[in-house]
Image: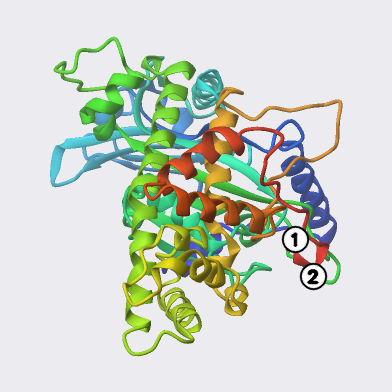
């Protein structure tokens, strides 16, 4: 089966138009309810567990054979035996009530075998949970597999993979560059990939931003609204549905068991009672607590902020300096327009811009051919130039990145899982400013003045100060403006 065909098979199908409309309305309401209490929330999404099948009722299991319950018997099959390894070399059960159970034996190597229980949401999947929720889902799976399929699982599961995620609502599309900068900061690389979901109302956007190859994506930042449209869970924007109040986004951190076993920094936070040299062969689910997961997530966010401020922002300054030097070799006049053409060309070719935003200009060193007594004016003219509005730098993507970092830290204080508020129906969302900040020009002018007075003014420290103080305060000094409805998607 082709990859395209497999993707199409994931799309929800409906028997009648009435069923379709009812599902669309229900799913839209379920999404909105997730963001009444908060703009965003951290939690656990999918968990893959290594489990032990203690016994299996062959009579019950073999009577359930369908496209959603497949199995392959061994050559030694004995109907009287409840030993799963004696009787089966493959079992695959998929059910919307819990996820998927897989048993597989490598025919070439009988010692290579596994039983994996995948717990994942099969509905609109905007909610996420805490460790208690994962145990509840495990209990549901155990009871269901026992009662409906005759499979008895051991009550002690082990972690194979866990997805930690941050889900947020925004009033419009979060710029692709912002999402790429965030993934790059967490993954500590500028090599990030982006692709689109088909059959969406935002076909010109790249919806899925990742680091690493598909089968080993440690970090993912994707548009859940676009994915839900693709899966036919909610309607696309059309004449009938002219706009959507919010867009949902999810950032995911995938942790595989090898990483959990071998990464000492990660282990010291998630399993602080273990010695650094203690060898881990398996990781019981009982090892994980909400408190330690939150501590680990805070560590990850702080590391990403440090990488963004100390590594990515200096590259932004260096790139501006390179472009200025390149475009003023022969003549200075008109260099700003030439720089902006280089920035735009880079973004057009790669969907990426090393130049984060206008603030980088403040900290850039100009070539000696510029009048040293007039550098502040040169920088100000650069920032406020006519071509600025056509350049990615004018959108202040860096401030958008900082605000999302600050939001991630704020939401950790609420614990793990989706929080609901039955007493309100007012939806909260992150306002994408698109460069429209009150007092933006005044703020940048003040920074120019500080740069003139203090030669060693730090770009990284200014950015961190905004993340940890200004953006985390309800009364921002730089407050985003509301955007008009025509910008919403």
Crowd class of label 2 (few under 14; some 14 to 19; many from 20; radius 10 Å): few
Q: Quadrant of residue 191?
A: bottom left
Q: Identify the residue at the far front of this view.
A: 373
Label 2 secondary element: loop
- Where does residue 251 sit, x and y in percent of width and height? 51, 45
Label 1 secondary element: loop
- The residue at which mark 2 appears reads as 238
Does residue 214 appear to the left or right of 279 in the view shown?
right
- The residue at which mark 1 appears reads as 235
Q: Which residue is drawn at 39% across and 64% down?
A: 354
Query: Looking at this view, is 228 or 21 the one in front?
Result: 228
**Quick check: marks 2 and 1 in contact, CB under 8 Å?**
yes
- Where does residue 430 sit, x and y in percent of width and height? 68, 46
Quadrant where the C terminus is found in the figure: bottom right
- Where does residue 376 sit, x and y in percent of width and height? 49, 64
- Where does residue 146 sit, x and y in percent of width and height? 49, 22
The answer to whether residue 369 is above or below residue 359 is: below
Q: Residue at x 65, y 68 (%)?
A: 202
Would residue 97 be seen by someone viewing this image from the given angle?
Answer: no
What's the coloring here?
rainbow
């Amino acid at each position: 089966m082709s990859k395209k065909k497999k993707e199409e098979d994931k799309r929800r199908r409906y028997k009648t138009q009435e069923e379709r409309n009812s599902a669309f309305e229900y799913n839209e309401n379920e999404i909105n309810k997730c963001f009444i209490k908060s703009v965003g929330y951290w939690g656990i999404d999918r968990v893959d567990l290594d489990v032990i099948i203690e016994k299996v009722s062959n009579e019950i299991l073999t009577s359930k054979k369908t496209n959603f319950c497949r199995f392959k018997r061994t050559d030694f099959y004995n109907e009287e035996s409840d030993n799963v390894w004696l009787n089966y070399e493959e079992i695959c059960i998929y059910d919307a009530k819990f996820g998927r159970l897989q048993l597989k034996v490598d025919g070439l190597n009988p010692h290579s075998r596994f039983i994996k229980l995948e717990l994942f949401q099969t509905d609109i999947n905007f909610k996420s949970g805490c460790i208690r929720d994962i145990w509840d889902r495990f209990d549901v799976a155990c009871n269901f597999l026992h009662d409906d399929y005759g499979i008895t699982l051991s009550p002690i599961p082990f972690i194979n993979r866990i997805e930690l995620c941050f889900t947020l609502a925004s009033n419009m599309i979060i710029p692709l560059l912002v999402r790429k900068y965030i993934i790059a900061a967490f993954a500590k690389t500028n090599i990030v990939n982006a692709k689109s979901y088909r059959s969406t109302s935002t076909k010109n956007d790249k919806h899925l931003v990742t680091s690493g190859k598909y089968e080993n994506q440690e970090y993912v930042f994707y548009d859940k609204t676009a994915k839900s449209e693709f899966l036919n869970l909610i309607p696309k924007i059309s004449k009938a549905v002219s706009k959507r109040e919010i867009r949902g986004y999810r950032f995911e951190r995938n942790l595989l068991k090898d990483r959990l076993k071998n990464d000492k920094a990660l282990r010291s936070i998630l399993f602080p009672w273990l010695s650094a040299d203690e060898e881990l062969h398996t990781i019981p689910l009982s090892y994980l607590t909400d408190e330690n997961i939150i501590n680990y997530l805070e560590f990850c966010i702080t590391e990403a902020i440090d990488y963004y401020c100390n590594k990515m922002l200096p590259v932004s300054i260096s790139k501006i300096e390179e472009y200025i030097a390149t475009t003023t070799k022969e003549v200075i006049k008109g260099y700003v327009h030439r720089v902006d053409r280089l920035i735009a060309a880079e973004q057009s070719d790669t969907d990426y811009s090393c130049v984060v935003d206008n603030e980088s200009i403040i900290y850039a060193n100009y070539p000696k051919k510029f009048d040293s007594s007039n550098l502040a004016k040169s920088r100000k003219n650069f920032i406020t130039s006519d071509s600025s509005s056509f350049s990615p730098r004018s959108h202040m993507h860096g401030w958008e990145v900082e605000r999302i970092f600050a939001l991630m830290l704020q939401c950790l204080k609420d614990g793990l899982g989706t929080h609901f508020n039955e007493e309100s129906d007012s939806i909260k969302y992150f306002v994408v400013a698109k460069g429209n900040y009150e007092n933006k020009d005044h703020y940048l002018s003040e920074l120019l003045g500080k740069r003139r007075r203090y030669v060693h003014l730090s770009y990284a420290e200014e950015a961190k100060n905004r993340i940890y103080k200004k953006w985390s305060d309800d009364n921002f000094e730089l407050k985003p403006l509301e955007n008009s409805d025509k910008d919403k998607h």
